Amino acid sequence: MPTTSSPPPDDAAAALRAELPVLRKNLEQAVLRFWYPRVVDRTHGGYRIAFDAAGAPMADGSKMIVSQARMLWLFARLARAGYRAPEMREAAAHGYRFLVDRMRDIEHGGYVWEVDEAGARVTDGSKVIYGESFVLYAFSEYFRATGDGDALTRATELFDLIDSRAHDAAYGGYFELFQADWSAPPASRPSPIGGPAGAKLMNTHLHLLESVAEYYRASRSTKARERLFELIAIQGSAVVRKDLTACTDEYRRDWTPILEGTGARVSYGHDIENVWLLADAVETVGQSNAPWLDLYRRLFDYSYRHGFDPSQGGFFYRGGFNAQASQREKVWWVEAEALMSALTMFRLTREPVYADVFARTLQWVSERQTDWKAGEWFAEVQPDGSTTGVKGDRWKEGYHNGRALIESIRIIEGL
């Protein structure tokens, strides 16, 4: 990381505070205004996620667990943060009821991967731990935002189910994919979030780290704290290739890395997301981040050296090992995680270089990634400056950028 001509820490903190109006404007006028109320499906329940590049509704014949849970989380977190709290609580309650009433598997436990638009028919009853993790995350936040004891009860039931069905007692971590009845899937069937069949995924464990931390804050469960320590070890060591000090995504059951095919690349967004979620989890279990700072710096530095755009700000998408980014599009969620990671590193170190990365990424987001006309962020900005992708689908909702804006405001206000 470059350190020359950086302002003193106090000046850097003051510069960050000056960015608060920019962050609030983006949250309220680009993100919140886009998603509420258009996403709330008053006809069928839950959330209707599909919107084209201009924000117009598209045909959407199904509802998927990840996007439903993420939007529930966003509305609950906005309520807890005090943004239009009565409306956000109602919007969160609307999504909570859909997940509980239409996506819960009463016979086998857990939550199904996909239902039809009305929630009347299960279209994919698989149990995918990535998806179950987001339900745990959403229910835990919903409890914290509303005090609804039913949500905490259901979060506890789900945590216990994930632990009993998916936890790997022999090697640590969690199995990825199950049939509807929690039996093993066909050996050739991969997870819907990617990777080879049967693999353990860094991406899934990244979000388990996030969801178990949130559940622990809500419940103070002894078992959740134990699992959180295990997830910290996985995300802080097992998924880190020590020769690179960068993470890869795909692993065999015993955490042997798969470094061929799609395993032979670094996702800058996931690496920098891992930095701040690790820091959050370490603090959540009541420990100091001081012993972890060297790892955080080196992970951030790898993505910075290979993936940061020094001319325009922001981070590129992905690249090979020890090479400059080969996929040079700028993806909305990567920029969101860059904001949170750079700001967390400044909070922990008070090193102004991280405040500078935050400011330059925020400038990119404000000037190029945000669609101020139609609302929301562009899914991708290509190297030639053109924008591609839709505003909303089953993998793109208001979670990554909404979370980054809410939490960045909270951190800066606390500096």
Image (tube, rainbow, N blue to C red):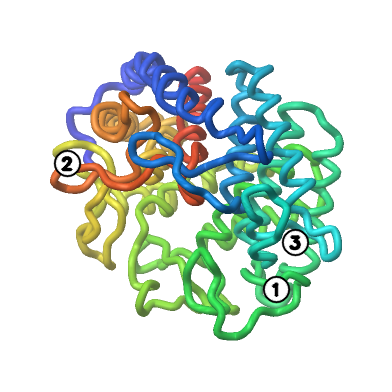
Please report contact status of discs 3 and 2: CB closer than 8 Å, yes or no: no
Figure check: 59 above or below 353: below
Q: Which residue is mark 2?
A: 385
- Please state which of the two labelled residues, at mark 3 or mark 2, is closer to the viewer: 2
How far is disc 2 from disc 1 in space, using C-alphas?
43 Å
Q: Earlier in the sequence, mark 2 or mark 1?
A: 1
Local packing at callout 3 (Cα closer than 10 Å; few below 14, some 14-19, many 20+) is: many
Residue 297 visible, this angle? yes
**Residue 352 is drawn in which quadrant?**
top left
The secondary structure type at the circle numbered 3 is: helix
Local packing at callout 1 (Cα closer than 10 Å; few below 14, some 14-19, many 20+) is: some
Q: Is residue 396 left or right of residue 111?
A: left
Horizontal and vertical percent position of residue 47: 60, 39
Q: Quadrant of the N terminus?
A: top left
Task: Check residue 179 in the rendering and tell me which mark sits there, or answer none.
Answer: 1
Horizontal and vertical percent position of residue 176: 62, 69
Please report contact status of discs 2 and 1: CB closer than 8 Å, yes or no: no
Q: Amino acid at mark 3?
A: Ile
Q: Amino acid at mark 2?
A: Gly
How far is disc 3 from disc 1 in space, using C-alphas?
14 Å
Residue at position x 39%, y 77% in the image:
259
Horizontal and vertical percent position of residue 391: 40, 40
Q: Earlier in the sequence, mark 3 or mark 2?
A: 3
